[in-house]
Structure formats: structure tokens, C-alpha cells
Amino acid sequence: MNGERILSHNQVRAFQPEKLSAPRDFFIPEVIKHRANKDTAAKNGTDTLPLILEIGAGKGKHALSFAAAHTDKHLIAIERTRNKFEAFTKIFKQQCPNNITPIHADAIAWTVHAIPPNSLTRIYLLYPNPEQHNPNQQWLNMPFFEFLLSRLRAGGEVVLATNIDSYMAHAEQQAINIWQLPYSCHRIPTDSQRTHFEIKYLARGDTCWQLTLKKPEHYVTRFDNWYATD
């Protein structure tokens, strides 16, 4: 099959993006519209601008520091919780970085309606809710994860961080057995300060872990040619 990697679909029920409505007040950011328009993208350089997605941006600590350190990349930072998003946008408006797009929405519905296939260079999932009582909602257990991989470019990465050993161990097994992705896993340095959670966990002596998954060339999902119609 020309080197294509076929997922273990029989172990993952199919995600159904067509059943999700667009979030309230939905809009597609200009940075995505420009990339879709090849003439405009070539003119303003956004055809080669790496596009990064952060899901669960919280109060924006990682997003703002990332944008300041990577002015040649554009970060779309999604946060669902209103009070956290308001804290994020307050600082965002003070600093006015031109390479962040803050989004207040449910990340799954928003990604389905806004992100085209094969467009993201990296996806950050930093300290998600471990869902210890509902493991089906852990990122690598969700059918949506296949859709998320379809939005990632070949060679792109998913970066997952957690302070829960069992969550990380299970995510590693899912990367191998279900998603068939090459990965690396390492301890996060004790002086790292990417998010408020990371600072809190490291300060109290927790071990924090990072799992970096890479999407190989010729990786196949069931959504590689799926686009929202609205």
C-alpha cells in the first residue's frame, strides 16, 4: 500500500464529526483563511508559517511565552472555561502578540469546523484532566484523537504532559498498540515553568512527564479528506 500506515481501526470506534455543530459565535481565524487561499498565503508568507494548536490553554501562560519565543510560528490557543479564558485574554490584550489566536470554545467541536486536514505542525495537550474515573475521555482513548491526527502534517508532533504516572504509562501503550506512532518520553526538568499546573506540580515534588508523538509520512486516517461544510 505504498508505505501507508493503517490504524488499528477495529480497536477504535469511528469518530463522527458530521454530528457536531459549530460552537457558539464560531469563526475561522484569518490565519487559517489565508492558508486556504493560496494566492493570499503566498503573498503574505502564511503558506509556510507553522501553525500550532494548544488545547486547554488555561490562563495562557504557555501560549504567551511560546509566542514570545517563537515569533515565526502562529499559535491557536483554545480554552473552554470562561474564567480561565478571561484571565488569558486580559494579558493577551496587554501584550498584543500578533502570533496568537485565543479561542473560547469546546476544542473538539471547534477543531472539527475550523482546522483543515494536514495543516498543524504541533499540538499541545499540557496537563489535561486525567479523567481517572472516566478513562474513555483520556485523549489517546478518544475516537476524536484519530481526527486530530488527520489535522497534523506528516512529521508533526503531539506533545502531551502529565504528572500522573499511570496516565503516561497508558498513553505510551495506546501510542504503540492503537495509534502506531513513534514517540519519545522523558521527565520534565524540575525548573520548567510552562504552565501554572506544571509550576505547582514540580514545586510539590511531583514527577512530570512529557510524551511526544510524531506523525510519520504516509500515515493514514479515515479523515484525511474530510472537511466541514459550513
Image (cartoon, rainbow, N blue to C red):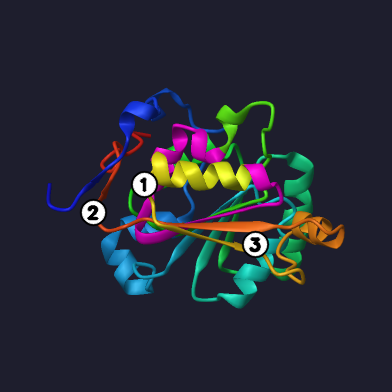
Q: What whole-number distance in Å separates the C-alpha atoms at marks 1 and 3?
A: 29 Å
Which residue is labeled 1 in the image?
180
In this rendering, the count of numbered labels is 3
Along the viewing direction, whichever of 37 and 188 lies nearer the viewer:
188
Q: Name the N-terminal-most of marks 2 and 1.
A: 1
Tell me if residue 51 can be seen. yes
Q: Amino acid at mark 3?
A: Ala
User: Where residue 112 sits in the image (x, y, percent)?
Assistant: 44, 38
The secondary structure type at the circle numbered 2 is loop
Q: What whole-number distance in Å separates the C-alpha atoms at marks 2 and 1?
A: 12 Å
Residue furthest left in the image: 2
Q: Residue at x 64, y 62 (%)?
A: 63
Question: Is-magenta flag for residue 164?
Answer: yes
Q: Amino acid at mark 1?
A: Gln
User: Where residue 170 sits in the image (x, y, percent)?
Assistant: 56, 41
Residue 131: numbered disc: none
Dot 2 and dot 3 residues touching (CB under 8 Å):
no
Residue neighbourhood size for the residue with mark 3, other residues' Cα within 10 Å, grouped as few (<14), some (14–19), many (≥20): many
Along the viewing direction, whichever of 227 and 183 lies nearer the viewer:
183
Question: Is-magenta flag for residue 160?
Answer: yes
Along the viewing direction, whichever of 135 and 111 lies nearer the viewer:
135
Q: Vertically, is 30 above or below 5?
A: below
Could you tell whether 37 is left or right of 3 in the image? right
Q: Residue at x 43, y 67 (%)?
A: 50
Region in magenta: 139-166
Q: What whole-number distance in Å separates the C-alpha atoms at marks 2 and 3?
A: 30 Å
Could you tell whether 122 is left or right of 96 in the image? left
Q: Name the N-terminal-most of marks 2 and 3.
A: 3
Residue 63: numbered disc: 3
Q: Name the N-terminal-most of marks 1 and 3.
A: 3
Could you tell whether 47 is left or right of 206 in the image? left
Disc nearest the viewer among 1 and 3:
1
